[in-house]
Amino acid sequence: MKEPLIKCDHLKKAYHTQPAVEDVSLHVYEGEILAVVGPSGCGKTTTLRLIAGFERPERGEIWMQGRLLSSPDIFVPPEKRRIGVVFQDYALFPHLTVFENVAFGLRKQPHPQVNRQVNQMLELVGLNHLGKRMPHELSGGERQRVALARALAPRPQVLLLDEPFSSLDLDLRLKLREEVRTLLKGMGLTALFVTHDQEEALYMGDRLAIMNEGVVQQLDQPEVIFSQPINPFVAEFMGSANFLPGRVVEQGIETEIGLIPQQVSLPAGSEVELAVRADDIGFDLKGPANGVILSRVFKGVMNVYKVRLHSGMVLEAFQPHYRLFAEGQPVRVFADAGHELACFHNGAAVKGDERHLDGVTKD
Amino acid sequence: MYLPAALVALAMSLPLLYLVVRASAAGRSAWNWLLRAQTLQIMGQSVGLALAVMLAALILGVLLAWLVSRTDLPGRSIWSALLPLPLVIPSYVGAYLFVSFFAPRGLLQNLLEGWLGIERLPSVYGFWGAWLVLTLMTYPYIFLAARAVFSRGDRSQEEAARSLGCSPLETFWRVTLPQLRPALAASSLLVGLYVLRDFGAVSILRFTTFTRAIYLQYQSSIDRSAAALLSLVLILVTVGFLIAEQRIRRSAAENPHTAVHPAEVIRLGGWQVAALGVVFLILLFGLIFPTGVLFYWLIRGLLAGERIANWLGPLLGSVSSAGLAAMVTVVFAFPVSVLSVRRSNWLSQILERWSYIGYAVPGIVVALALVFFGANFVPGLYQTLFMLLFAYVILFLPQAMGSIQSSLRMVQRSLEEAAASLGENPLRVFQRVTLPLITPGVASAAAVVFLTTMKELPATLLLAPTGFSTLATQVWGAVSEAYFARAAAPALILILASSISMFLINHHATLSGSSQRQ
């Protein structure tokens, strides 16, 4: 594997105005987009601010291309780092035009070159006709693009994006994130992308770092995180709605919805929890009922059912839009995954047979 | 609604229109007089004093605002609360306290004579005295404006500049300061206007600017056209300042500020002591020293047998004239305010502008215009309380309108429409829905007019009926005759009144500001 471009080692920053970073280690490789994702207050933005140089770590080190940027003793100020930042609120300078905003970081170059580069950047984000406008005359999407062009103009080695789409409405957000990903990939730029939206992280990131309570819980390719979450938090954050208790037996795992034929490296009789996504749950009217339909919400392409098992446990289950059952209908609930389910014992993932996704890459 | 509004606008502008007529009829001799060296000198002194005060207030205001909002100055929240306070001292009271300390027969000389035998001090009168006093009275305008910008200062913008390669100092010059510029320009123009309009301080400190010259001309000469001409020139200068101020304010309002992040705190290190010294010096001269001198004269007066009964008359005069002015002004302010908020068209806008005329015209000029107008058209009313009230209404109508308009804007149109759809006619809608909702705004308008009227000096001096005195004229009279102890009690009451009105204006501004944001 290549040397990482950015390397964070055991960063700690606990400051009363910022969500704390307890112990963060992560690597970003050249040309890669790393999506850092987690609930609000998990420390993802503080991590980004540490890398940008807006905060000093209390402990730990940040390296870029073998150069030490931050440690408790050494601190390279942000203006000397060549790290671009796209802020959540864009932070466009209200007293400067779009053109002047983009040119802001370029003034150490001769004049014609600045003009050329600004125009090139504006063209890149599709705004070359708006150079004379003031920031307050732009729409939200246009401001976002100016912020991106401004950060890219000085040709940073790394680009940091702090929830850049969060203040846009949904349609625009989907459109822009596609544009931005294509743009970054086309430039081969290394980027760290912070978001609280797991779906956005899956889309944007070549790899994902899931954060919670100031710690990176899991850092891997999206497919691996999705199918092999390392703990219940990651499983739930990646969309598992149900945690089903079970007990290890010789043939697999015994649960309230039947035997799951899945081998785990635990002695028989061990108590485990299975993460079951709503699309892994099926039910029908054949055989003895073990639950009853509690509610149905129609979402167009599918129905979202809530089913109560006899034990009182409630599971969420997706069914195709044409499968309609009345509330109160007794049904037989079963697991219908087609893949191994994530299995946890005392809050940690239990491996069955080792499977890897080394061959799988995006693009 | 248009008719009463038009009548109010007309009434507000008639005397001044007459002043124009009167001045233009003065003939060639007056124009020659206007171009004399002495007249040009007055203009030069007025504008020069305004510019010098603006510059000094600007430097002080920005420096102090930066210290209390961006650095780790010890006790900065206390300084931040104390530093705007000189604002509540009426300019002539500030000048009185200054003169009563430094002037011949003043406090300092008494002390020095007793101890050191020094009998002559350098003169406090003239440019430098006026400059110092007015700077201390006006730097809070700049301070407040700069503090507002500094404290809303957007951290992420400054961080963006840093990540684009700017050092902290460059960031201040290229990002922070440019955003301060509109607020600073607007507030220093306000300071300039304050100085141009000021009559009390420059008169007590014997520095001849427009206002003092107008007063002296009015008092001395039989042909008062010269005073009228000077007034017109003064109006032109103030209108110029006002237009510039409005322009800047409008362009500044277009910058939306969305920042919520607190800005980085700058460590002063060894500069802390120097910074504390500056803050302390300003508070010493702007606050501690005036308060101390005021209480010295108060106590000394009481010990010397100054009778409380002596200022009961002026107090009664102030309260009664200010109370009447508040009521009349609010009633006059209603039609134009309602019209301009609810029916915004070219006619209502013209009427609104006309009614704002008092804002552009210094008190001494309004008073002079009314003297001319009254003497020629309504001699029966000349030298009566009615004329004085008329001047107060012209001067303070803009304040009342501002307050009533902003509370009207807070009443959603749909509330009135709902009442109408429930079957009420417009008058009943106003009575049952609008009026109850704007009552607090109207009350604060009345209170502010009341308190501002109490402080008013030049118009009261010129127009008060014979034998009628107020706290302001009492201070003026006592200081003119160097009875410093006699001026202390009325001055104290005026400072208190002024503090309450500042509080009300601020309180109202915060209220309407927050409701607009929602």
Image: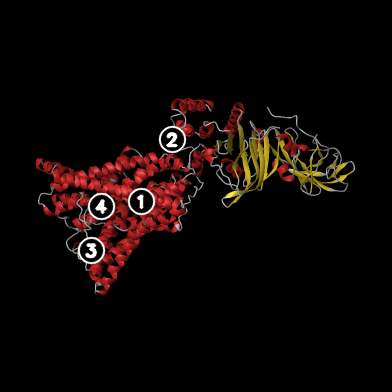
Which mark is drawn over residue B198? Answer: 4
Chain letter of disc 2 in the image:
A
What crowding class fits label 2: few (fewer than 14 Cα within 10 Å), some (14-19), or many (20 or more)?
many
What residue does disc 3 label?
B474
Q: Of the residues shown, which amino acid type is indicated by label 1?
A: Leu
Tell me how far mark 2 sits from mark 3, CA to CA.
Answer: 53 Å
Which mark is drawn over residue B60? Answer: 1
- Label 2 and label 3 in one chain: no
Tell me how far mark 2 sits from mark 1, CA to CA.
Answer: 27 Å
Q: In the rendered image, which quarter is residue A217 located in?
A: top right
Tell me how far mark 4 sits from mark 3, CA to CA.
Answer: 18 Å
Q: Of the residues shown, which amino acid type is indicated by label 2?
A: Leu
Q: Secondary structure at mark 2?
A: loop
Q: Is residue B442 toward the left or the right of residue A267 in the image?
A: left
Chain letter of disc 1 in the image:
B
Camera-side mark, 2 or 3: 2
Camera-side mark, 2 or 1: 1
Q: Is residue B95 toward the left or the right of residue B65 in the image?
A: left
Where does the image place residue B228, in percent across and percent down from the top left? Answer: 16, 47
Where does the image place residue B186, in percent across and percent down from the top left? Answer: 35, 44
| Sequence-first tag of 4 and 3 | 4
Tell me how far mark 3 sits from mark 1, CA to CA.
Answer: 33 Å
What residue does disc 2 label?
A96
Which coloring applies here?
Answer: secondary structure
Check the picture and name the quadrant holding the N terminus of chain B.
top left
Camera-side mark, 3 or 1: 1
Where does the image place residue B182, in percent across and percent down from the top left? Answer: 38, 42
